[in-house]
Image (cartoon, rainbow, N blue to C red):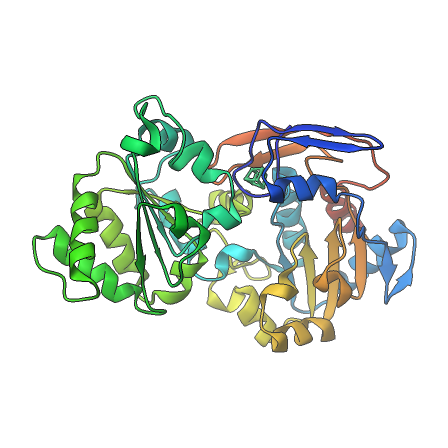
Amino acid sequence: MICLGCSCLCDDIECEIGEEIKVGNACLRGFRRIDSINENRLTPRVERKEENIDDTIKSAAKLLEEAKNPIIFGPENSTLETEKEAIELAKKAGAIIDNMSSFGYSGYLVEKIFRKEVNTCTLDETRDDCDVSIYWGCDPMSSHPRMMSRYSYYPRGKNRQRGWEQDRDAISIDVRRSLTAEICDKFIKVPPGRDFELMKAFKDVLSGKIPKFGDKKSIMKIGNLIKKAEFGVLFTGLGLNYSINHIDDFIDLVKDTGFRLQPIIEGIGLNKLLFDETGHVNKINYKDKSYGIENNFVEALKGDIDTALIIGSDVASNIPLKLAKRLREINCIYVGPHSNLTSHISKVNIPTAVCGIESAGKAYRMDLKEEDLEKIVDSNFLPDQEILKRIGDAL
Ligand code: SF4
């Protein structure tokens, strides 16, 4: 089976779900997703009172119908079919649609890649050819635990037969010594918010100058390694995105190095569908077909949003407490398989099947490789795409 625990979508997972749950090949995160499938399941509720599923769907539709300024957020780990339904629902409800990619600059970088303004590559090309990988502001060993072992560092690739010992170099750039930094050959600790100065230092080395920032000797060594790379890949994450104000300078640096850019991102399927339709990957308001920062989930929540439909994302755990309280005050509907803080503060809870285990569909890996997800076990829960469709039909 394919694991939907993160956007690596590992396709070699062995899984048996019976009285006992047996899982092979998955990382701990993937194992927990399967092993804990029956824990903490969401129950259908309206205003904390248990209801049947039809009534929760009707209540959700009513809230969206009465909303003046609704927003739809997510889904994160779901299928392309669900992402399509989320967009259709946003159109019907005249809602903003956004996802986690608008926190920081992940979405911005993905949009540049879709526009072909920055080079990228597939994870399979990374495995076969990459000789230098950089992890800037990301910690895949924690967030995407098998990415380095399957693609970017440890495996023997078609043209990298000697593997990490001789054929590959890995560099971590982060504000702290992360798990990824622990296994990389080189690590640069960059003080929070000072990535821009480090970028300038690398630009200096690339143009043959002495850098003026940080540990000049190691920056020069890494700069020279970057210069010599035959097939370099730069992975980024929220750490970089939160601390760089000069994101276009960062893109210029990536172009100067000749590296391929791979943002480590969840929910890229929604980004692609929105891009194909609107030319933007997130922050779309279907009320007036506008695109802009005011449609970012956090900004919208600070504004006059009165209803939020959250699909499979525990967004309340990822925003400041003040905004989580605001989410509790408005009409919040949560659609997802398990209870979490977001479901707890929502007025309507609609449980769903767990995608890729209890329901099938298609999904994109982080590099847009399309995978078919199988249904492994039967369940009484409806797939999330069906829930969204039924809300849309009831509008
Ligand atoms: S790396 Fe991601 S996709 Fe692969 S097994 Fe772990 S959680 Fe699942």
On the image, which quarter does residue 310 sit in? bottom right
Residue closer to the observer: 34 or 4: 34
Please report the residue visible at 75 percent of the width from the left and 48 percent of the height from the top. Answer: 337
Residue 106 vertical position relative to residue 375 in the rendered view, above or below: below
- Give how far across and how far down residue 104 sits, in percent: 45, 62
Please report the residue visible at 77 percent of the width from the left and 34 percent of the height from the top. Answer: 21
Residue closer to the observer: 281 or 219: 219
Asked if residue 326 lies left or right of residue 102, the reply is right
Asked if residue 266 lies left or right of residue 384, the reply is left
| Displayed-image quarter of ligand 1 | top right
Residue closer to the observer: 45 or 228: 228
- Give how far across and how far down residue 12 sits, in percent: 58, 27
Count of marks placed on residues: 0
- Give how far across and how far down residue 332 sits, in percent: 73, 65
Residue 272 vertical position relative to residue 369 in the rendered view, above or below: below
- Give how far across and how far down residue 297 sits, in percent: 57, 65
Asked if residue 221 lies left or right of residue 232, the reply is left
On the image, which quarter does residue 116 sit in? top left
- Quadrant including the C terminus: bottom right
Please report the residue visible at 79 percent of the width from the left and 57 percent of the height from the top. Answer: 61
Residue closer to the observer: 369 or 67: 369
Q: Is residue 87 visible?
A: yes
